Each structure stands twice: as structure tokens, then as C-alpha cells.
Image (tube, helix red, strand yellow):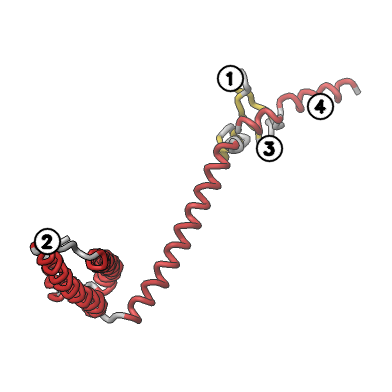
Amino acid sequence: MYRWLLTALCLTLTAPVFGEMYRYETDEGRTVMSNTLPREALKQGYEVLNKSGRVIEKVPPPPTEEELAERRRERERQERLEKEREEQKKEDRRLLRQYSSPDDAVRALQRKLRERFGTVRLKLANIKNIEGQIANLQKRAANQERTGQEVPESLREKMETQRAEKTALLNEIQQEISRAEQTREDYRDKIKRLEKLTGKKRSLPLTIPEEETAREELATMGD
């Protein structure tokens, strides 16, 4: 009986260990091998070894709060980029339906610029008319002063009114030119995108002769 128990005990002690083992490092930096996983190992990360002692899996420690936050930010960034890509695809399809080529978009821009600078030319003509009226009023006032007469208040008020109208028209012209510049910039972006989508370069200018003429006339306007 005792001989049988002794034999069984020897066999148990000398038998190879089957199954997986775990290797991890303690908080103190000590390497431990065990067939169980304490909470400490789960926190630090561990390695899984087979019966031959070879590493078959490496389990990293769970991510920190900072790492989780960074992953969340990265995921949100990727989602935002994907949304932007989808929106760009929709815009590209709309752009290609609207314009067959970059020059097609340039022609549309030129039409809008003609409208803008046509309005500018009309306002410039009005200013020239007002300047003529102001010159006549100033001449009348000068004649009265030369003859020793006092310039009527109504005449002075009329000149001030004409000057105010001129100033208002000049402001309106500047606003119209600013709108034209914004229109050009909007179309410039469209044209560049069409060049990329179609592989064609524009051959038409982004300016019109009417614009140059209007700017030259505006430069000659007095205060």
C-alpha cells in the first residue's frame, strides 16, 4: 500500500506540466511565471507560454484613460474626414453636371462680372453727372461772391447734397467691386477643382475688358 502511494507521488512530481503558463512582471519589476493570472498581471500585461516555454501570445496592458481619449479623438477625426470626403464627392458630381469644362465655368464667371461692372459703369456715369452739377453750383456760388453777394444757404445745401450723393455712389461702387472680387474667388475655386477633375486647364482669363475700363474711370474720380 505504502509502496503504491510513493510511486504515485513520484510520478506526479516528475510528470511534465501540460497546458499554458503566464509570465508577467510585478509592480516591483520582478518577473513571475504562473498558471494563474492575478489582477496585477491583467493590469501590467502578460505573455502566454506553451508547455515548451515558448511565447504564443502577448497580451498588452489595458489602455489608459488618456489613450482611450486619444483613440476616441482619432476615431472622431476619421469620421469627420470620411464625411468631408463624401461631401466633396457630392460637390464634384454637382460641379460636373453644371460645367462641362473649366472654360465653361470661366464663361459663367465672365457673365456675372459683366453684370457687376455694368452696374459699376452706370453708377460712374451718375457720378459724372453729379460732378457736373456740383461744378455748376460752385460756379454760381463763385459768381455771387465776386459780385459781393452772399451765397444763399439753399445753394450751399444743394452742393452738400450732391457731394453726399457722390460719396454714397462711390461707396456703392466699392461694394459692387468687392462682390465681384468675391464672385471671382468663388469661381476660382470651382475652376481649379474642374481642372483637377477633368485634367484640362482653363484657356480664358478671369477678368473682362469692362472691368479694366471701370477701374480706370474710378481712378480718375475726384473726391
| Along the viewing direction, whichever of 120 and 37 lies nearer the viewer | 120
**Residue 22: % across, % down:** 64, 32
Mark 4 and mark 2 residues within 8 Å of each other at the beta carbon = no
| Crowd band around label 2 with a 10 angstrom C-alpha radius: few (<14), some (14–19), many (20+) | few
Residue 28 vertical position relative to residue 145 in the rendered view, above or below: above
Residue 54 location, x and y as percent? 56, 34
Question: In the rendered structure, which disc, 4 or 3, sits on the residue that comes first in sequence?
Answer: 4
Disc 1 marks a residue whose amino acid type is: Gly
Say which residue label 4 marks: 8
Nearer to us in this view, 42 or 216: 216
Marked residue nearer the N-terminal end (4 or 1): 4
Residue count near mark 1 (Cα–Cα under 10 Å), binned few <14, some 14–19, many ≥20: few
- Residue 146 has which mark? none
- How many angstroms separate mark 4 from mark 1 (CA)? 38 Å
Query: How many other residues sit within 10 Å of disc 4, few (<14), some (14-19) or many (≥20)?
Result: few
Mark 4 or mark 2: whose residue is earlier in sequence: 4
Look at the picture and state if 92 lies above or below 69. below
- Taking the image as drawn, is residue 197 in sight? yes
Q: Position of residue 205 (x, y in %)?
A: 15, 72
- Residue 162 located left or right of residue 48: left
The amino acid sitting under disc 4 is Ala
Q: Nearer the viewer, mark 2 or mark 3?
A: 2
Q: Nearer the viewer, mark 4 or mark 1?
A: 1
Instruction: Name the front one of labels 4 and 2.
Output: 2
Question: What is the spatial separation of the Cα atoms under label 4 and label 2, in whole angstroms?
Answer: 143 Å
Near-viewer residue (45 or 138): 138
Of marks 1 and 2, the one in the foreground? 2
Tell me the SS state at disc 3.
loop
Q: CA distance from mark 1 to mark 2?
A: 109 Å
**Which residue is tagged 3?**
19
In the rendered structure, the answer to whether residue 33 lies left or right of residue 146 reads right
